[in-house]
Amino acid sequence: MSRSINIRIAGKEYPIAVSGPENERLMRLAAEDLNARLSRYESKFPGISMLDKLAFVALNEAAGKQAVQDELNSLNAGLSSLEKEIGSYLDGIENNR
């Protein structure tokens, strides 16, 4: 069951549908993080537009997401390799019985 909540981003309220308490928590945390990042950009670059600040935040988030995806891919490759090694080890034990 989804319900609507209001999230404030860069001083503007947005109604957002959330599917449950965990989704609401994540949306609220994301909005807090976004606003904190915008605030930091405002301090560093007071002359740039809000649109430019939002673009910088989006770019940093996309880069962070890509870094996490790369790490996940690396971990999955390592897990696959480990599964093969364990399988080979167990096959060796079974063949030596």
Image (cartoon, helix red, strand yellow):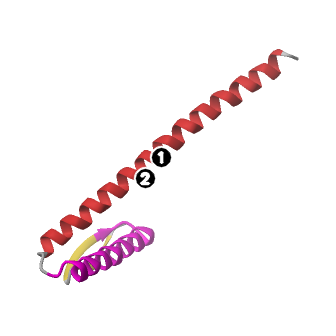
The residue under the point 27% across, 81% down is 39
Asked whether, in this view, residue 55 is left or right of residue 70, the answer is: left
Where's residue 9, x and y in %? Answer: 24, 78
Q: Do the residues labelled 2 and 1 touch (CB within 8 Å)?
A: yes
Circle 1 crowding by C-alpha within 10 Å: few under 14, some 14–19, many from 20: few
- Reply above or below: 96 against 69: above
Residue 8 seen? no
Residue 11 seen? yes
| Marker disc for residue 72 | 1
The residue under the point 20% across, 84% down is 11
Mark 2: which amino acid?
A: Val
Where are the magenta residues, as a range?
17-46
Q: Which of 33 and 59 is in front in this view?
A: 59
Q: Looking at the rendering, in which quadrant would you find the N terminus?
A: bottom left
| Marker disc for residue 68 | 2
- The total number of labels drawn is 2
Mark 1: which amino acid?
A: Leu
The residue under the point 75% across, 21% down is 91
- Reply above or below: 60 against 94: below
Give the alpha-carbon distance from disc 2 to disc 1, as whole Å.
Answer: 6 Å
Where's residue 57, x and y in %? Answer: 26, 67
